[in-house]
Amino acid sequence: MIVIIDNGKGANEIASIIRSSKVVKPSSIPDASAYIVSDGANANNKDVISFVKKNSKPLLAIGAGYLQLGVAFGSTIRPFNISGSERLTIKQRSPILLDLKKSFSVVCSQKHILSECPECFGPIASSAKNELAAIQHGASLVEAVENPLPLFGVHFNPESGGDGRKIVDNFVKFVEIWNKYHN
């Protein structure tokens, strides 16, 4: 089962895409085969950041969840307004970007951005406004990561439309394969 950690925005929309999922609050995260951290307010960030730091199971962090993932791995956040449809370009292959064209559309509504790429992460997709629109642990082009974790972050809201829903579908497929070899 995939647990969706509800940061306040989009959790129910994500749950409607994923058949076997459960929506929970950041204060009570159960054991699961994988996790999605939804967008929303940063008010719950301490619980989420603490959880992300110790998690080694597949995780897709969305919007504010993406910012919390970045902070958990040493990045900082700065104000930056991005809203509406965005065109992203794939920078590196990734399981969550399978079957997407080199350039694809997503919906974004964010007031903050990561100041720098978190440690051990690399950009897998970028836009004209955000070089770190999608990140993956172990995807660093600068330094090889010995044991990459199955952690992904997207600054945009894949559940809101465009080609983003394919990313949620790809994450679910990734989790199925991951669990065959890691349980």
Image (spheres, rainbow, N blue to C red):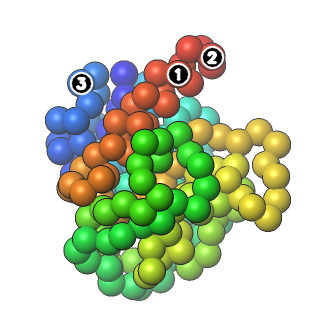
Residue at image location 53% in from the left, 22% down from the top: 177
Residue 57 position in % (x across, y down): 55, 32
- Residue at 41% x, 49% y: name it: 100
* Residue type pointed to by label 1: Ile
Measure the alpha-carbon separation of dots 1 and 2.
7 Å
Residue 43 visible in the shown view: no
The residue that disc 3 covers is 19
**SS class of the residue under badge 3?**
loop
182 to the left or right of 80: right
Q: Which residue is mark 2?
A: 181
| Residue at point 59%, 49% (across, down) | 93
Image: 78 above or below 64? below
Label at residue 143: none
Of the numbered discs in the image, which one, if any, rests on residue 177? 1
Q: Quadrant of residue 122?
A: bottom right
What kind of element bears circle 1? helix
